[in-house]
């Protein structure tokens, strides 16, 4: 069974720092990987989607990389701002599941200190 | 553009009661799904649909029913509520199935069963 792990579970850094969030998955037979952001009391917002054939995706200050062979993805946030404070989740879509439904990690709770 | 709309936002039920959680999307997405989010468990797939008239079970389907009579609506029915169904429920939709395109989430329904 696919398992998705996110480390660290929580992170607090001063404003302006560059930071990396980690996501690992146990089965490398995935179709794609998504990074989401969740604000308190809200739904999830898709940030970046990486297809299995891609190595990375970029959107503004965010960069996500994917290494299928090692079962890892990282989300890099440049020049962090207090507005980046949220919980970040990664999720993979598996080939074995018939490409329906995502398996989520439990998230990294990020606090950016002003 | 409303995106994915869920109602109600909050609900309290007594054990044994039934109710329907509503979900509607206005993006003409074929793929819709229901997740529940529990502390320490992450998000888990309940049911999903790849188009009108087609539904299938996810990871945790017991105690829930779904139907998909139109592209826009995907209601989730709790047949006989149990305390174990206390959770936050999210509806999500996407243009492509299997995580092939970004997943759009509603803001959730917080359900408490006493």
Image: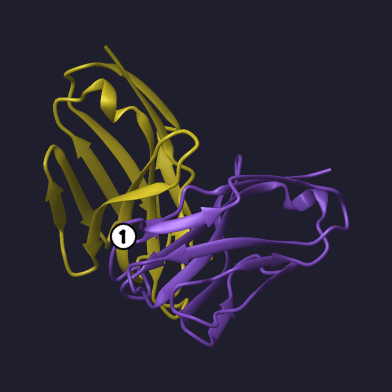
Chain colours: A yellow, B purple
**Residue at left offset 80%, top offset 62%:** B18
Please, what secondary structure does the residue beneath circle 1 have?
strand
Q: Quadrant of the N terminus of chain B?
A: bottom left
Q: Is residue A76 above or below residue B19?
A: above
> What x and y, as percent, mark residue B103?
36, 61
Judging depth in this view, the residue of B52 and A57 nearest the camera is: B52
Residue A28: image quadrant is: bottom left
> What x and y, as percent, mark residue B39?
61, 40
Q: Residues within 10 Å of mark 1 (few under 14, many from 20)?
A: many
Relative to B109, A107 lies left or right: left
Q: Quadrant of the C terminus of chain B?
A: top right
> What x and y, as percent, mark residue A55?
15, 59
**Residue at left offset 20%, top offset 48%:** A64
Residue found at the very far bottom of the displayed protein: B53
Q: Is residue B49 above or below residue B14?
A: below
Relative to B53, A77 lies left or right: left
Residue B27: image quadrant is: bottom left
From the image, tell me which residue sits under label 1.
A33
**Chain letter of the residue carrying label 1:** A
Judging depth in this view, the residue of B86 and A58 nearest the camera is: B86
Judging depth in this view, the residue of B108 and A73 nearest the camera is: B108
> What x and y, as percent, mark residue A51?
23, 66
Judging depth in this view, the residue of B52 and A93 nearest the camera is: B52
**Residue at left offset 29%, top offset 18%:** A13
Relative to B19, A106 lies left or right: left
How many marks are shown on the rendered structure? Answer: 1
Residue found at the very far top of the displayed protein: A114
Relative to A60, B78 lies left or right: right
Residue A99: image quadrant is: bottom left
């Amino acid at each position: 069974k696919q398992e998705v792990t996110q480390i660290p579970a929580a992170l607090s850094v001063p404003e302006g720092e560059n930071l990396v969030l980690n996501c690992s998955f146990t089965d490398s037979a995935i179709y794609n990987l998504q990074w989401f952001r969740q604000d308190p009391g809200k739904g999830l917002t898709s940030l970046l989607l990486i297809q299995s054939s891609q190595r990375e995706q970029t959107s503004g200050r965010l960069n996500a990389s994917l290494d299928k062979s090692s079962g890892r993805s990282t989300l890099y946030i440049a020049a962090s701002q207090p507005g980046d404070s949220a919980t970040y989740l990664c999720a993979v879509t598996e080939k074995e599941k018939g490409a329906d439904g995502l398996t989520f990690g439990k998230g990294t709770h990020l606090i950016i200190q002003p | 553009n409303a995106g994915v709309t869920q109602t109600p936002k909050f609900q309290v039920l007594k054990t044994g009661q039934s109710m329907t959680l509503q979900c509607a999307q206005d993006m003409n997405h074929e793929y819709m799904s229901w997740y529940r989010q529990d502390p320490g468990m992450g998000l888990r797939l309940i049911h999903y649909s790849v188009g009108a008239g087609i539904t299938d079970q996810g990871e945790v389907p017991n105690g829930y029913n779904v139907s998909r009579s139109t592209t826009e609506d995907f209601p989730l029915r709790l047949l006989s509520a149990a305390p174990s169904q206390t959770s936050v429920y999210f509806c999500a939709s996407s243009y492509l199935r299997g995580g092939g395109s970004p997943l759009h989430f509603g803001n959730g329904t917080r359900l408490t069963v006493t």
